Image (spheres, grey):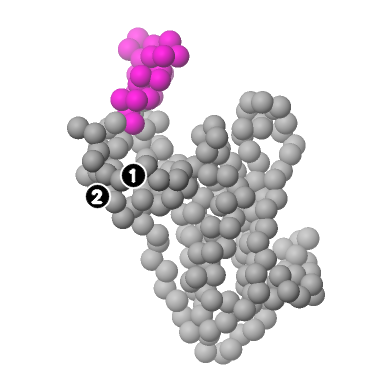
Amino acid sequence: MPLQLPIYREANANISDTLTEADRDEMQRQAELAIAHLLMALRIDQTQDPNTQDTAKRVAKMYVREVFAGRYEPMPKITTFPNTKKLDEVYTVGPITVRSACSHHLVPITGQVWVGVIPGNTLIGLSKFTRLANWVMRRPQIQEEAVVMLADLLEEQLKPKALAVVLKASHHCMTWRGVEDHDTIMTSSVMRGAFRDHPEARAEFFKLIGG
């Protein structure tokens, strides 16, 4: 039975609030059937070829449970701490290795994220930057929107005096197909607060992450 849920939102929207674990199981089952039909349309044997007998099942599980997990799973729990020492210097986190998927072709985007913060009254644990970055990136999207989404989330959690997010990534929609250019890297950045308004703070951030 098809899912009777309002799941048709933007490709990079999180819809975990509409899903139960049973719904995710059903989504995976339906995806497996659809992928099997895709393989049939591509004239790929799924019965005699041992290498493709379980491909539809593997691909469905990969997309629902891994590649697009940021779309179907709730945001990781983030524990915050008060900035009791009134820390007000720049600190950076990165590079955080991330992967996503181009929403145009559903092929990988792989890259690294750097975050810079001048804290306000709130701090979060170091590992939480990685957890949040992975949660945001694991969904189909374009890089320009992904970096803004991550910056919005970090700003909401930290309420910092300054926030910088830089994402450098390689896109398989360029390396695997089309122009087949293997050298091009796309860089996106978001600067807020003092990093946006004060060139010396921005320069310090870029110096700390190696330019």
Kindly tell me whether residue 92 is visible in this rendering.
no
Q: Which residue is under mark 2?
A: 20
Q: What residue type is labelled 1?
A: Ile
Image quarter hosting the N terminus? top left
State yes or no: residue 42 in magenta: yes
Residue at the image point whose x is 70% and y is 50% from the top: 187
Up the image or down, 12 lies above or below 96; here it is: above
Kind of element beneath mark 1: loop
Q: Where residue 7 is drawn, which disc sits there?
A: 1
Element at label 2:
loop
In x, y percent, where is residue 118?
64, 77
**Highlighted magenta segment, given as a residue range:** 31-55
Residue 45 in percent (x, y) is at: 39, 11
Whole-percent x, y for residue 14 in the image:
40, 52
Residue type at mark 2 is Thr
Classify 91 as above or below 4: below
Q: Which residue is drawn at 53% across and 57% down?
A: 149
> Is residue 40 covered in magenta?
yes
